[in-house]
Amino acid sequence: MKKISGKTTKRIALALGAALACAALAGCGSPSSAGKNGELYVYNWGEYIDPDTLTMFEEETGIKVIYDEYDTNETMYPKVAAGASVYDVICPSDYMVNKMIDNDLLQELNFDNMPNALSNIGASYYDTAEEFDPGNKYFVPYCWGTVGILYNTSMVDEPVTSWSILWNEKYKDNILMQDSVRDAFMVALKLNGSSMNTLDVNELEAARDALIEQRPLVQAWVIDEVRDKMIGGEAALGVIYSGEAIYTQRENSDLEYVIPQEGTNVWLDGWVIPKNAANKENAEKFIDFMCRGDIALMNFEYITYSTPNTAAQALIKDEDIRNSEIAFPDLSQYNNLETFTYLGEEGDELYNQYWKEARSQ
Amino acid sequence: MSRLYGAVRKFYIALIFLFLYAPIATLIVLSFNASKTRAKWGGFTLKWYQSLFGNDIILQALWNTLAIAFLSALIATVIGTVACISMQNMRRSTRSLIMGVTNIPMLNADIVTGISLMLLFISIGIRFGFGTILLAHITFNIPYVILSVMPRMKQLNPSTYEAALDLGASHIQAFFKVVFPDILPGIFSGFLMAFTMSLDDFIITHFTKGPGIDTLSTKIYTEVKKGIKPEMYALSTIIFVSVLILLLLINYTPRAGHKKAR
Amino acid sequence: MNRKLLSAPYLFWSALFILVPLCMVFYYGLTDKTGAFTLENILAIATPEHSKALWEALKLAFVSTVICLLLAYPLAMILCGMNSHKDSFIVLIFILPMWMNFLLRTMAWQSLLEKTGVINGILGFLHLPSLNIINTPAAIVLGMVYNFLPFMVLPIYNVLVKIDKNIVNAARDLGANPFQTFLKILLPLSLPGIFSGITMVFVPALTTFVISRVLGGGKILLIGNIIEEEFTKTDNWNLGSGLSIVLMLFIIFNMVISAVTDKDGEVNAL
């Protein structure tokens, strides 16, 4: 009869213990003491900040930053709404800010504590923010951009000007779509000439049918994996946020980014302070720090998303980047640009229902 | 005939090994890739190993992962084994009832277990963090221990235990001399399973973790979106190689006292 | 008796951390957003999207479980036949892959299977036709088998290793051929392990959402994906709980089956 002998078992257990001890030693190297001026819980998109700026903030203010990341507005919302986790600063997008205001999850900011937020952020961005944050009470812009088509010039030989190329049989299995309800419907609604904030059932059904029709051509519905897949030449066309375009072009020079003629989504992400925040003062210090020209520049260079920070824009040394159509597009030449608005609970449900139907065909 | 059987056997094992280790080989290769994205080979480099040791965030996540895995597996093994022993003498209906409850975390979608625990923690007002993750991991680890120990228990011959009692052993002595050695492999594989399950868990941790605490899984999940940082491949390679070396050491050290242990 | 007392910690634990949270899921599943009683969340399984996702998940989980069993049983037998000096090592080799993170390994399969991936690179080099299974159900099944195979091997191995070699030898002596020995001796004796294995594979396969997302490219929605999205994206916990309750019906079904076979297992062991 065979079995693992007791001796062997003991030895393995000892070995596991030893491994754990080694790991413990490695783990102890990291600092974990609280800052002398308190703490700050930040909840931001994945890879949406230059980590060095966090270290600088900690050194300058003595506030310890506890940093956490999420992947979509929709995954952030339930966490904050449930009150399971208490954060001091969050970075949602336009329509989500609106939803959070509506559901009484945010508190008003005191701009007196944030001089940089007033002086450095372009006034036009606050004007845009009025749409979802009337009176500019809750929101300080951090990054903005558009959604467009990233394509590989070695695989697509015709000019890309319209969303309709994503319905072209020629590119079967070579198309990457955004796996998020608002972005996917934006593409289909814009293709049909509708508003991307429509609540018209007929328009939504038409968009859903367009997505169903497109389904066999789509290689995958993904979110930010588009970046890696496009760099690797896995697909010819992908729907992507403008901020990723510069990064992907650096890695693969065959890639081009266009805003289709039917128009697209102009989005704006920024800082808000949730109602249940425990460290409001520190949060405002943090927002102010992020609005400093040099810090905003560091972040821009690290994440390559367009910054609304005029002080940072002036500091950009690279002429090509400063004048880049992708980083700072002149939006006046496009028609039909829109910003997502919060559609209310019923609107959300409607979109979600159609989105589910589109994907399960 | 038996030589042919031996060859087929070896071939089969080799095939399964290839299947199990192909992705791991891929990860190891990626850890030496100079290019930051996994889609492109940019030449051989060791720089990710270097930067790994300067990366406090990943090291902290590693520490959290190991500490939670070890503690939760240990506690689950104790609770689970004790539960198995106590269930032996129960009426069958009671036992099936308990086993039914035991099966719930295993049979339930991880997401539901995660969410339901989150609801519980919110309602009793525990602060989310290391503690909540640990409680959740113990909960889903116990069934793995029980399911590993139970089959061993069932194969036990009850008369050996009774014989020990007849020969004057106390219940505790009889248990440790007769029952325990027989179920030990089950306990051990249960512990190991619990440890690995905890190490591997993502979903439940995701729902029970608090701000600022990450295990490797949740860290990777936030990174999946923008492409995994190559340091993560380097770390996985190190973990893998060290576990492998440990196993080789265990296997090839002289086995003094082996007979005595039998 | 003191044995009864021994069960107390576990009973307390399972009541607090299994049953109470479960009641909360039932509460959510049986109420609407205002807190009023409703069956709507459970009946929602009948809508075409949801029933298709459930059917798809059942299908893929079933296929994966069968493949796992077919691969694992011979493997467990081979492992049992190996010399005892190596056995713990061999078993550990099979759970060793799990020490590399599950998400990372599944991602690695993506790198292997992609259109421009490693496997197609090798096939192209050998002038063989390329393999296009990424983002199809086949890739998901592969991912499931890969991730859950050890859960099938270990319980079967654990039982097989306990079977007295003398019984097998006796059967041989009495003239049974290897096939008969397997059918009449090994298989019945190893049933408890097989059923443990089936439970351990089928359930996570049925409820997974990560594998289908990473290897299915978001094109194949399983019931796990639907439930996950209700909780984490759509933020409709009532519907998510309702659909989970439906999933639990399958759990109860599974429990009944294992309870029945459990009895058989014990009868055979006597």
Image (cartoon, coloured by chain):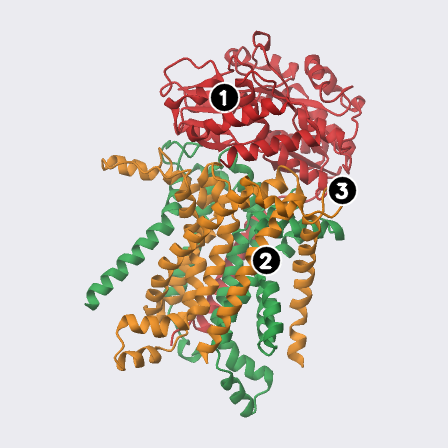
Chain colours: A red, B green, C orange
Residue B105 numbered mark, or none: 2
- Which chain contains the residue that carries disc 2? B
Q: Position of residue A163 (x, y in %)?
A: 49, 18
Closer-to-camera residue (A255/B236): A255
Q: Position of residue A158 (x, y in %)?
A: 38, 14
Q: Which residue is mark 3?
A: C34
Residue A245 numbered mark, or none: 1
Amino acid, disc 1: Ala
Answer whether labels 1 and 2 touch (C-beta < 8 Å): no
| Secondary structure category for the residue under label 1 | helix
Closer-to-camera residue (C126/B34): C126
Q: CA distance from mark 1 to mark 2?
A: 44 Å
Q: CA distance from mark 1 to mark 3?
A: 44 Å
Residue C223 relative to residue B212: left or right: left
Q: Please tell me whether mark 3 or mark 2 is closer to you in this view.
A: 3
Amino acid, disc 3: Thr
| Secondary structure category for the residue under label 3 | loop
Residue B189 relative to residue A131: left or right: left
For the point 66% across and 55% down, which residue is it? C22
Quarter in which the C terminus of chain B is drawn:
bottom left
For the point 27% across and 78% down, which residue is it? C172
Q: CA distance from mark 3 to mark 2?
A: 28 Å
Q: Position of residue C111 (x, y in %)?
A: 40, 38
Closer-to-camera residue (B154/B45): B154
